[in-house]
Amino acid sequence: MGIITFFYLANDEEKEAPARFQRFLIATITRIMEGYGNFEGGTEMKADWRRPFVSVMLALLLTGATAACSQETEGPGGIAADGGGSNAEDAPGKLAMKDGKYKPEVTMTVVKSLDDSVKFKNGETIEDNVFTRWAKERLGINIRYLWTTPTTNDAYRTKLMLALTANEPLPDVLEVSGELAQDLIDSGKFRAVGELFDDYASDTYKKAMDEAPGAWLPYIRNGKPYGIPSIQYTMQHDDALWIRQDWLDKLHLRAPSTIDELERVMDAFVNEDPDGNGEKDTYGLALSLRSNYNAWIGAGPLFGAFGAIPQTWERDELGNIVYGSVRPEIKGALAKFKEWIGKGYFHQEVALHDEMKAAELFVSGKAGMAMGPTWLYDWPLQDVKKLSPNAVVKPYPLPTGPGGKLMQKSEGTHTMVTLISKNMKHPEIYFTMENYLYDQLNDPKEGDEFQYGFANGYDYAMIDGQPVYESDRIPGGYVDPLKYFPTMPPRIPSAFIPTLAELYNGKKPTTPFEKLLSHSSMNQMEAASIVVSQHEHTIDELFTGAPTPTMKDKWQNLAKMEQTAFTKIMYGDVPLSAFDDFVNNWYESGGAQITSEVRQWYKSVTETSSGDK
């Protein structure tokens, strides 16, 4: 479920607002000082990083609490909101536009977290690039960055929380993870978006969102949504089994279709010297068991082969919502993991490996299999060819477990959400940009602006009147201008993976979108065909709301209890019966009450129309 936050500011009594805001600041500081990391990715802040911030954070606490006492407007969580700005209701009339462009130009402030995959060319920066110039020239919108951060050490969250506690200006539009959004919505600084969406979103934008009606549920307060989900392609993160085909061929093996066959292949990859170096230094499967079993190179499908997915709120055989990690089916999976670790099928430090460390094991030529999404070969698995030029990697269906069981967790319809500041005078500016991109970028027609990609010379190049997409044929190399967008690129959920599968299965590309996807790697298209064929065996996370009351107090200890118990069982430090003790302790230590609260939440949000904004 991701990180469970430890402060939740939902109190409707106005007289409590200053005290609540002070508690909010204290909790925020506590969170930063404790270095509570990212449960999804395993990133933790270091103690030496925290020390310099002690004095400044205490000062912010005092100024923030004072500021809270002077506020009058309350947000969805009862937190005093910034009264210094203008809401859309108080803003001047409709902005002037001519030929689809604001005249005079308007400005939209944003922030962004930049990872190493964001590349620039031609001397451009995040503030001045082919996208920001396009927005200015095409729409009359100036994109102005208040700040950016790297993705490391939870820097983005920390910067946001510092800005919030110091009462600094917040951006007009802000995209954050669904988990972080819960904290920000409850700060009272961001506005309800349902009416805005109804009034300003284009038909194309609305139809795309209609494909993911449940995406709104986590951000509803008092019947109103406070965040616009950044929906993504469905099945984009469904897993296939990626295998070193050259190892299979050398050892005269077939790709496994069951867990028993997977075990035989792993045994051969460990004991029969598939890399031919005369040493026993290879592993059967690369995976991450550090914190999130459902990571992009994780163990979720292996658990699923036994009938349950850990770290997921799912339905049991009676249809009741339960926490997957305490289901009895998990016990059989843990027994198998214990056996496999004992036989050396996994790296001995697999419990410490995050996704990148697991990928590194495969790329270095030391592991013969990995489970991951359709894009896993394009990045990073194909780098195995740098050390092993003759390596061949192919995708296969996930293996089934006892009784033909097959299950994996869906990534869901979104991981990010867009919030709009209460102080944004003209929130329609954001929709003007999104509408254009939804209408023009997702499924362009012949002759349209984005027929071949976003920008000539960036994600494609025109040579002799034809588009080319190979990086070495694009002057200065390929860069992805969609990564310059202040929010995730607009997506129509059903458009991508099914189209890749159809192309792999022989469909002739006719539309610009299909022609563009036809340049995808054959491995990705084959993997898409596989995940489409197995998609009926994916399950969704059923709890996507804000932390329940008991979660705020108990979840950190429960998560630690789970991680410790599972790791000790898998490494043989305790007997398998310790799982039963863990389940009993989990329920007695708050799990039973949390389960009740999760069921109540699910009932409350599904009894109303999921599309009602």
Image: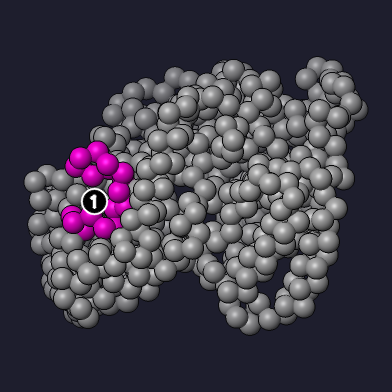
* Residue 515: percent from left, percent from top: 47, 27
- Residue 398, position as x, y percentages in the image: 22, 48
The magenta stretch is 314-330
Q: Left or right: 182 with respect to 252?
A: right
Residue 488 location (% of width, % of height): 59, 41
Within-10-Å neighbours for mark 1: few <14, some 14–19, many 20+ = many
Amino acid found under the numbered disc labelled 1 = Ala
Q: Residue at x 54, y 69 (%)?
A: 36
Residue 166 shown left or right of residue 208 in the figure: right
Which residue is depicted at the point 61% across and 22% down?
Answer: 439
- Frontmost residue, 286 versus 223: 223
At x 52% / y 21%, what residue is drawn? 207
Residue lying at 59% horizontally and 59% vertically, measured from the top left: 7
Q: Which residue is mark 1?
A: 308
Viewer-closest of 310 and 354: 310
The quarter of the picture where the C terminus appears is top right
Q: Is residue 450 or residue 340 the one in the foreground?
A: 340
